[in-house]
Image: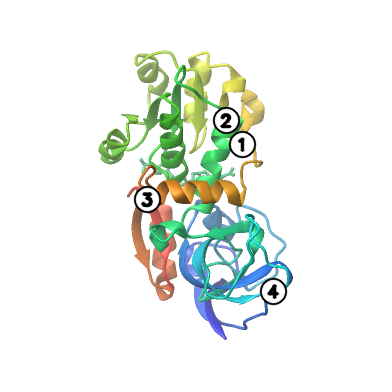
Amino acid sequence: MSRAALYDTTGGPDVLYVAEVADTDPGPGEVTIRVRAAGLNPFDAKMRAGFIPSQAPFPRRIGGDVAGTVEAVGADAVYWDGTPAAVGDDVMGRAAGAVGDRVTAHVNELTRRPAALPVEVAGSLQVAGLTAVSLLATVPVTSADTLLIGGAAGAVGLVAAQLAHATGARVIGTASPVNHELLRTLGIEPIAYGDTLAARVGALGTITAVYDCHGRDALDAGVALDVPVDRMVAIAAYGALEEIGAHNVERDARTPENLARLADELASGKLSLPVAATFPLDEVVAAFTAVESSHAPGKIVVTP
Ligand SMILES: NC(=O)c1ccc[n+]([C@@H]2O[C@H](COP(=O)([O-])OP(=O)(O)OC[C@H]3O[C@@H](n4cnc5c(N)ncnc54)[C@H](OP(=O)(O)O)[C@@H]3O)[C@@H](O)[C@H]2O)c1
């Protein structure tokens, strides 16, 4: 038996509890991971709250991002680079229901964790990192661009801003004032979100592309500043995309190869993804409360 975070009904963080669950053997192409870090995402909170419909039976597990050590290997479990999975591998990636002691994952959603990458960062990377890569794949930028990122101090925004900055693009990012210094240290020009955003951004120069990583404020600013709709993409704009005609984010870039590349860049210090706080499994309610209320930059991670 293992312990895992579960919920029996949709609702706020306090519907979560920790209980024993039966371990299952990994199926073909799968491995069982001893979880060392499970980064939390707004998506997990939206699922738990019932904002994203699901037919999955209760009790449900929660989580997706994971890093840990392989404890059992199913038949034909071969990583994206052609190497076979083995007991003892340090891996990272995605596993549905990762917030618990053990979880089963398909190897095509995993890669090996570089030794120099802290396990808490590795266990926080898949969703934010691959969404950021997907933003750049959907609306590529170059040194000829001035990019506006809405929500640049969030996990997706931070990675996307650094990847865009590395192309030579000028990057302007919205954030709470408390996060402006962090953005500056990464080469991003910070600007507060809120009233008169379009006018304040317009005063900084001509915007040629928009990634909205929070809602629709940056998209609306892009429309007001005459950014072509095919140069705008959003990940959480919901109704606004059809109304404006901007791109939804492409999913083609969510590959284990891209995850491995990001992991190497984080391990070598070319990229940064801060960890705001870690919580033991028994404090999963407090961990999700932090995800849903904090403006501290970086990931909230459960470390069972
Ligand atoms: N479509 C997809 O495939 C996909 C994938 C991943 C995530 N998402 C969604 O994208 C969003 C961001 O995810 P995340 O993991 O980056 O979340 P996160 O790490 O929790 O960051 C959210 C950020 O939103 C910023 N924010 C709050 N109010 C804002 C406002 N009015 N204007 C601009 N920014 C504001 C906050 O910035 P400050 O702290 O500076 O205030 C915070 O850092 C979530 O809604 C998530 O569900 C979608």
Left or right: 108, with 270 as reference point: right
Q: The N terminus lies in which quarter of the figure?
A: bottom right
Mark sitting on residue 233: 2
Q: Nearer the viewer, residue 102 or 269?
A: 269
What amino acid is found at the position of numbered circle 3 in the picture?
A: Gly
Expressed as whole percent of the image width and height from the top left, the position of residue 58 reads 66, 72
Q: Is the CB atom of the residue marked by disc 3 within 8 angstroms of ligand 1's nearest atom?
A: yes
Mark nearer the viewer, 4 or 3: 4
Helix, strand or loop for disc 4: loop
Q: Which of marks 4 and 3 is nearer the N terminus?
A: 4
What amino acid is found at the position of numbered circle 1 in the picture?
A: Val
What amino acid is found at the position of numbered circle 4 in the picture?
A: Gly
Q: Is the CB atom of the residue marked by disc 1 within 8 angstroms of ligand 1's nearest atom?
A: yes
Judging by the rendered image, the residue that carries numbered circle 3 is: 298
Question: Toward which corner of the image does residue 207 lie, by quadrant?
Answer: top left
Q: Which of marks 1 and 4 is nearer the N terminus?
A: 4
Q: Which of 150 and 262 is in front in this view?
A: 262
What amino acid is found at the position of numbered circle 2 in the picture?
A: Val
Helix, strand or loop for disc 2: strand
Alpha-carbon span between mark 3 and mark 1: 22 Å
Alpha-carbon span between mark 2 and mark 1: 6 Å
Q: Earlier in the sequence, mark 2 or mark 3?
A: 2
Judging by the rendered image, the residue that carries numbered circle 1 is: 249
Mark nearer the viewer, 1 or 4: 4
Alpha-carbon span between mark 1 and mark 4: 33 Å
Judging by the rendered image, the residue that carries numbered circle 4 is: 74
Expressed as whole percent of the image width and height from the top left, the position of residue 179 reads 30, 40
Helix, strand or loop for disc 3: loop
